[in-house]
Amino acid sequence: MESIKVAWDGFNHSPSAWLYAVAASGSAIAAWQYWQSRSSIPVYGGIWSFSRTLSTFKLGEKGREISMRAYAEHPITLIPRLEGWAATAHSKYVEEISKAPDDVLSFMDAGEETIQTKYTFGPNFTFDHYHLQVIRNQLTRHLSGLFPDVFDETKCAVSNYLGKQDNEWKVVKVLPFSQKVVAQASNRIFVGLPLCRNEQWLNLMVSSAIDVMKTASFINMFPVILRPIAGWYSTTVTKRMKAANDVAGSFFDEKIAAGTKGSSDDFTSWLIETAPEHERNSYDILSRIVMTNFVAIHTSSMTVTNCLYWLLARPQYIVPLRQEIEEITIRLGWSKEAIGAMIKLDSFVKECMRITPFGTQIMTRKVIKPFTFSNGFQPPVGTTVSAHLYATHHDENIYSNAGVFDGFRFVETSSGENGQKEKGETEGNVRKAMYTTSKSFLAFGHGRHACPGRFFAAMEVKLVLAYLISAYDMKWPDKVYDPSVPGYSEEGYRPPEKWFGNRMMLDMNAEMMIRERASA
Ligand code: HEM
């Protein structure tokens, strides 16, 4: 207080101090006007718009609201993210982004910036993406055959996590529970038994995803010119790879030594088969597995958690979902076909992904060569473009009552694209499954870089939920039924999510009660 008073007295008694202050404010305003005039599209940030970091902090918890307003008012808006500004486009431009060739709008270069691949996974990943082929082709083609293993591992992971099943209620933190189940079930496919049940391995795969995001966010706080230094200082690749190698190096050595003749049906063998010669060694294959875990576990376990939060917030969905699951599994058994036939569950998961997507922007691409949007806007080469995610999913012209959770919104076969009941364009009577991307459902992106793992993810997320709903009772602990608890509402408690800038984070500590069903 005293120092403020001294400064204020100084101003009062020194005309030159006032002059400097006026000049400084004038320069700041001029700099801001200069920045505004450089861009032919609106820029978020006001006086802070010269700095993406300051503007991201200004965005703070208001990412959703600001993005909704930008979407309603402007075709394209410059919105800050820690990694850089992104010219964020209305859903009517999604097809233009998704159809642009990679040498014009680059997914890889944008991804490199977002997760700082060079420092979080190593330089190889910047150039070679052969693991995509394995996910897109072999993994997706073999889903039916892989189903029994994913089912078996889901049951094993749930029962290990919950311990002795004595029909008593147990309290679990939802996010770590989902992470463990998804990590174990996914690794049954990625590395098989027994490694998929090795605690050290699973913990490493879960913590690596968090570690990568933390390291990338740290590096991205720095100006571009200083990022190599921040990357060199903060990289954890060597440490992580040493830990992974200590746990699983011999498994990969043996796999490579055994060769792939006879084409085994497992993910690691497919990777070894597809790897270029110079990467067919245990270190490189292991790092591809770590990368695959990174893209798979975090997204899928967040989706399971998001769905469980909605399910417990709207428990009226439990009975109809359970009826559907029981009726179908009696008829078709537990199989990929059965999971595919669960259209109420499919709709429920899709609605969760629609109403609470994990951020405000999606389909981020770096501009490599001149590109012109159909409204004439030309993002400068070297800048970044993206599409509105949250605002598209909440667009009333696409989804009626967009702000209301309607778990069976996508069930109706007579509805139009993405389940809008009256408004917007339609594509006939075809129901769109949760993995079907479109310009109005962007949770998996859209176009040539739409998530290649979405067919596996859809099967796994639905399977985990179907198994939990059919074999367990779940509810919130009594403490949440109190109006003073954040997230409480008359419709039902849902743990409030947190926003920072363009990113949404689910509550990491919310607990649920779970008990094996007597009839299961
Ligand atoms: C519910 C879970 C998942 C969600 C919500 C999700 C979402 C996404 C999104 C939004 C993208 C970027 C799309 C774009 O920018 O156009 C993406 C890319 C990707 N996803 Fe997923 N994903 C999920 C699960 C998975 C799984 C299980 C795997 C692997 C088995 C996977 C592998 C990948 C890969 C490799 C890419 C990069 C694609 C490319 O380079 O073209 N994802 N995912």
Image: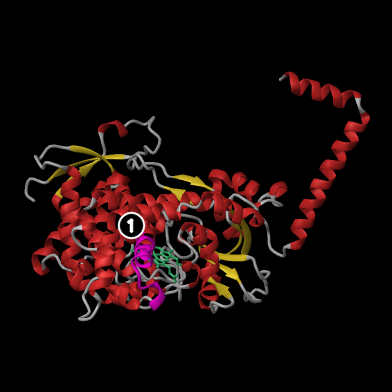
Q: Is residue 410 left or right of residue 32?
A: left
Residue that extends furthest to the left in the rendered view of this protein: 519
Could you say where residue 218 lies in the image, as x and y percent from the top left?
54, 48
Segment tinted magenta in the rendering:
276-293
Q: Is residue 503 left or right of residue 290?
A: right
- Reading the image, the residue beneath label 1 is 245
> Residue at image x 29%, y 47%?
314
Disc 1: CA contacts within 10 A as few (<14), some (14-19) or many (>=20): some
Total numbered badges shown on the rendered structure: 1
- The answer to which of 515 and 68 lies nearer the viewer is 515
Q: Quadrant of the N terminus?
A: top right
Q: Is residue 351 visible?
A: yes
Under circle 1, the secondary element is helix
> Residue at image x 91%, y 27%?
14
Q: Is residue 411 visible?
A: no
**Residue 148, quarter of the rendered image:** bottom left
> Residue at image x 82%, y 42%?
25
Above or below, 468 relative to 264: above
Whether residue 451 appears in magenta in the rendering, the answer is no
- The answer to which of 446 and 246 lies nearer the viewer is 246
Q: Is residue 474 left or right of residue 107?
A: left
Ligand number 1: quarter of image: bottom left
Could you say where residue 273 lies in the image, as x and y percent from the top left?
31, 77
The amino acid type found where label 1 is placed reads: Asn
Most prominent secondary structure in the magenta stretch? helix
> Residue at image x 72%, y 65%?
40
Could you say where residue 439 lies in the image, as x and y percent from the top left?
47, 70
Could you say where residue 133 lies in the image, as x and y percent from the top left?
37, 76
